[in-house]
Image (spheres, helix red, strand yellow):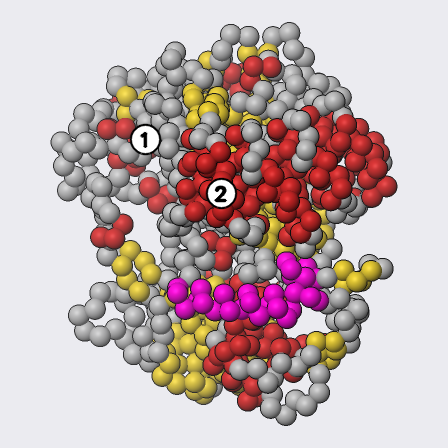
Amino acid sequence: MLKSFTTYNLAMLILAFIGSSFLLSRVPLKTFKTTYAIPARDTLPIVKIPEGVDPNSPDWKGIDLAPKAPILPVSPSDEQKRFLLPPGYKIEPILTEPAIEQPAAISFDGNGRMYVLELRSYMLDADSKNELDPVSRISRWEDKDNDGVYETGTTFVDSLVFPRFVLPYGKDCILSMESDADNVYKYTDTNGDGRADKKEFFTSKYGRSGNVEHQQAFMYYGMDNWLYSTVNAFRIRETPQGIIREKTGANRAQWGLTHDDDGKLWFQGGASGLPSHFQFPIHYGNFEIPNEFAKGFDVPWGAAVKTADMQGGMDEIRQPDGSLNRVTGSAGNDVYRGDRLPTNIKGQYFYGEPVARIVRQINPVVTEGLTTLHNVFQEQQSEFLRSTDPLFRPVDMTTAPDGTLYITDMYRGIIQEGQWTQRGSYLRVKIEQYQLDKVIGLGRIWRVTYDGMERDKTKPRMFEESAAQLVKHLEHPNGWWRDMAQQLLVLKKDKSVVPQLTRMALKHKNLTTRFHAIWTLEGLGALSVKTTQKLLKDTNPRLRIQALRASETLYKNGDKTLEPDYQRLLTDPDTDVLIQAMLTAKFLKLPNLEQGIKGAMAQNKATGVKVIGEQILNPPKPRNAGPFGAPELTEVQKAIVERGTTIYNELCAQCHGNTGMGTPAGEGKLMAPALAGSARMQGHPEYAIKVVLHGMDGAIEGKTYAGNMMASMKDQSDQWVADVISYIRSELSNDASFVSPEQVATVRKKTSGQSVLYKFDDLLRQTPYELTAKDMKATASHVFSTRIGGNASAQSAFNYEGWSTGGRQDKGMWFQVEFPQEVKLAEIHFTATQITKPGWRPTPNTPPASRPILHTHPRVYSLEISMDGKNWQTAVASVKGVPGANILTVNGAKAKFMRLSLAEGLPAGDDDTPWSVRQMKVFVEK
């Protein structure tokens, strides 16, 4: 027997399919109706507690297993009726399916066009099948008739593998990267058709391993002109000499990054359900701060959705309404900085908790220099925005060019990655009970408005404006306009506006305008010491803080005349300024640091001064103290860096600069090439070793330098050479491996006949280079996915996902690579990871150390080579693999095919440990 009811239509799903390959479309928002057939009760899914589960455990006790009608999507107009907002606030759809599918984030370019990150492969079923298929995209949308609806769109970039972010970066240009990849690319529309037709490399070493929820995301342009992201413990910046990077603290964030009017970054945690880093700018490192969250902050007050579909089980559910009783996931964030909503929410922090179906408003309260976060609606046991629609999934919040607040709603059934929705889990039972896995392919963007406050209908046209016109936007009351104008001014590199910016920084009546003027000058390389010293004496403490932060660039570049100013500000009467002076002193490693910090603490007894001062003097053990978030350096590695630092500062810095950016020599020339961010210095170590041993002169990539030549250092010991190269490769904004004295000795012997300085082109021909993964074809005897929802492909050995045999290592298993043409093999690098024993399930409160770990490196393997893929010969026999990084030296063997084969299986009694390969790199000789 069937019952009928009217709801959001099946035609929408058909339209979504038809529209999925559109290039240019005008899609008005409409309400579609149709009749669904709901199965009778006796045909609904029957769910039960999985075998082996204790029904009286906290996760399962009291679970409702009765058959339930499926949760079905409703139209945007019907969903709109289910929102609960404070009095005066309204919400309206501005872009929905079928035009977009599964939106995860939005951002705007200088002409106000909205880019939508569409994760079209996310959780298409409860097992996350095909999640890494190249079907996601980035679309671009415009409201051409200015009616408030984004009706005209193009597919800007298509066929992406779960893209991590979209960052507009100049005219018709964005930055993005794919999951499990390591490179960020710049995509540009060169012919104005709304579709990127040019793809350029931007930077590398940006990726991290993990499922799609745990990889880096949200590349973000900060007020300080650096680019940040979640997960990664570093920041990057484009300079005339290339991309540089600096270490930062660990942000512990997943999906959400924004900044306030003072440029402080706010990172949003994921599984914690809480903001993860917000006290001070992240580049000062991590501090343990007490009482960051007000009592009860972790309690969400969502509407009664009654589904009880929370990963944590019954003990995470508020009864009887079936809502979440403690935050468990969060996504997207924004410090509202617009001008078309009430002034009492300006500067307030908003973030989404998609499991609880809420958008939370936070009031940051600063007391004695430290910030405590308060849920604005906690006393009312409510939230800024709630919904009774169980499919509402807020994943991003954005201050828009029109001065309002936009909310990205993924609108779907499942909002948890497949690793946590497997059969046997509490969440899987609820997914099947309500058929949540069937609600996919939808998504809405909403605008929050307020009665009597009209959105700003002025259309940005910054790409057509001059630098002088852009400067005027720094006065705009909406922070989006100021941010975008600053970014475009810095990217333009037009210094004709420097006098105008300087006057604005020193004298403008608006404080935030002065902030942006300072940072625009800094971004243009035009912030003078004279101007900075005036700003450091300004009567406004917030302005002095900005001047301190911006001055760090000058000091790092070698101008030490600011030291007396820093010492003076360590006695500033304002607590916030004093803490900033302490952070700057720590960051710049000022002389007499300990004395200055102790003096500041003696003068000011504020809690913040005490907490920060004590941790500068006695730093807490960091979670990640190695380069760019790597594991903490060993004592041996620390000694190498210390010796290398001394060598560099005494010998190299004169020409290459204190920060590795090159010492200016006048007339636009540098004394020597920049080492910071250098792809050559971070590439195969043989390049750097040869240069240090035998020197180099002449042009480098067609560019000449005032110093003209690098002298030979072959009289120095192998350890000396290894130390300074290791320092350059792991510091100076670089992220590459250390070099050992043994590697230096090998190259020294190999090049013993080199009697003259190298020429760049000759050296490049003699240095191994890395083949690109797309030019190699991988196959294997056994192929198994390394993660739930991943690809079962040998080709994944070249990225962070990796390849695995799946089963126990056995003699004869092989992994093969076909090259595009015959090559001379130099080295093969790969990583063998450790995994948790398959089938193991943690009990409640299981400590991480108790997890059974399997090491997947090959115990003994051989390298075979072939010209036809049929006839093989052994090139290197009986190689012992090691956990982690493996490097195999081949010494020029010629091959069209190579094959790694297991020479031995696992010893008897060992667990069924598979063989895995990740991040494989093949270096060949020219």
Q: Residue furthest bottom?
A: 753
Give the secondary structure at mark 2. Answer: helix
Amino acid identity at mark 1: Met
**429 shown above or below 637:** above
**453 shown above or below 358:** above
* Residue 310 badge: 1
Q: Nearer the viewer, residue 168 or 707?
A: 707
Query: Which residue is painted at 74% across and 22% down in the image?
Result: 509
Can residue 904 be seen?
Answer: yes
Query: Which residue is painted at 49% across and 11% down in the image?
Result: 86
| Residue linked to disc 2 | 597
- Decide whether the magenta segment is chiefly helix, strand or loop: helix
Instruction: Please name which of the two marks, 2 or 1, marks the residue nearer to the observer.
Output: 2
Query: Which residue is painted at 39% across and 85% down in the image?
Result: 877
Q: Residues within 10 Å of mark 1 (few under 14, many from 20)?
A: many
Amino acid identity at mark 2: Ile
The x and y percentages for residue 686 are: 58, 77
The x and y percentages for residue 584 are: 57, 43
Query: Which residue is painted at 76% across and 42% down in the image?
Result: 530
State yes or no: discs 2 and 1 in contact (Cβ < 8 Å). Answer: no
Q: Nearer the viewer, residue 107 or 24?
A: 107
Query: Image quadrant of residue 193?
Result: top right
The x and y percentages for residue 415 are: 41, 34
Which stretch did the figure color magenta? 634-662
Q: Nearer the viewer, residue 272 or 541?
A: 541
Residue 833 covered by magenta stretch: no
Q: Which is more N-terminal, label 1 or label 2?
A: 1
Q: In the rendered view, does 154 fall on the left or right side of 588?
A: right
Q: Nearer the viewer, residue 683 or 113?
A: 683
Quadrant in which the N terminus appears? top left
Q: Residues within 10 Å of mark 2 (few under 14, many from 20)?
A: many
